[in-house]
Amino acid sequence: MRYQSFFQCTPNNGSDLLLDVWDTKVNDENRPVIVNIHGGGWSSGDKNEVSSWSKWFNSKGYVVFNVEYSQNGPDMWQKQISDTHDVVNWIVEHADEYHLDINRINLIGSSAGGHLALLTGYTDLKENSLAPRETDSDSTVEINSIINLYGPSDLLQLYDDTNSKEFIQPLLEQLMDGQPKTEEIKHRYLQMSPIQYVNETSAPTISFVGLKDKVIPEEQIEILHEKLEENNIDNQAYYFPFSDHSYDTNWESIANQTTRQKIEEFLSKYN
């Protein structure tokens, strides 16, 4: 069952945003959560685009929240991560209403949504600045696991190394309000790179990417999982030889069937 609700953004963002709640009747208390963040190059896309995934997670007993985030205007690099942190906090605040287990909150995102899922999962938002999550932080909402579908982990490297510079570079410039040619803007790209925040407290992470992906190179997954290994974080990465970007939109493809199988096994381990 799907219905809409609102979550309150921080005052700097200026307005409420919608989310879709996919409720489940598999059980009636202490239910695990999936926060589903859509892609779209940080500037387009819609929460309805991930409905197939939400229905599938719903059928497995998860209460799913498909979220919106800001996409227009300046300072998107600050507003979007504020939005995703806000929705996680909103879910915790409404846990009793939806009978949720706040110790079983899992994030998933594809492409730009994967980037935001990683960044949200690995950071705390403190006074409008990002900081690595720490186990002794009273303000931290614990993230149980992160599912990354071909989302980038290092935006500065992505800017230079993507095979689709004519596509990716303008999107990153729009997101970050500029090219990474000054120290200030380079720092902004680094600040918005999930790999910068991986530490020994990071959530278990599983990633997927096609080796024919013309937008997000597999190196974006490799460097992330090398960093996770260095910090002894449980992680898995899967590379599909014949798959391009957004391969999961073909729901019945072999790659996507394998992806769902691996995700189900991964989630069962932590939920």
Image: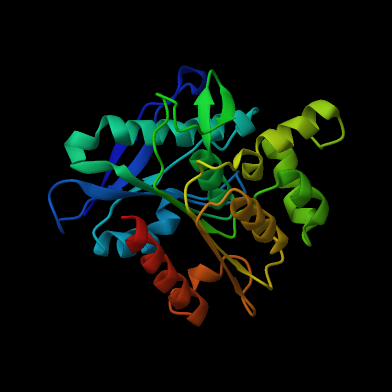
Place of residue 98 in the rendered image (x, y in percent of width and height, measured from the top left)? 20, 41
Give the residue at x 55% y 70%: 247
Left/right of residue 65 with respect to residue 69 in the rendered view: left
Q: How many marks?
A: 0
Q: Residue furthest right?
A: 181
Q: Is residue 148 above or below residue 16?
A: below
Give the residue at x 69% y 73%: 212
As rendered, which of 227 and 168 lies closer to the eye? 227
Left/right of residue 42 with respect to residue 64 in the rendered view: right
Q: Quadrant of residue 196?
A: top right
Give the residue at x 14% y 55%: 27
Q: Is residue 15 above or below residue 235?
A: above
Left/right of residue 162 with respect to residue 223 in the rendered view: right
Q: Quadrant of residue 26?
A: bottom left
Give the residue at x 44% y 41%: 68
As rendered, which of 72 and 226 lies closer to the eye? 226
Visual colour scheme: rainbow
Q: Quadrant of residue 80?
A: top right
Place of residue 144 in the rendered image (x, y in percent of width and height, measured from the top left)? 39, 47
Left/right of residue 258 with respect to residue 66 in the rendered view: right
Residue 34 in view of the camera: yes
Q: Quadrant of the N terminus?
A: bottom left
Residue 73 in view of the camera: no
Q: Is residue 101 above or below residue 249?
A: above
Q: Quadrant of the C terminus?
A: bottom left
Q: Residue furthest left?
A: 28
Place of residue 166 in the rendered image (x, y in percent of width and height, measured from the top left)? 80, 55
Place of residue 148 in the rendered image (x, y in percent of width and height, measured from the top left)? 52, 56
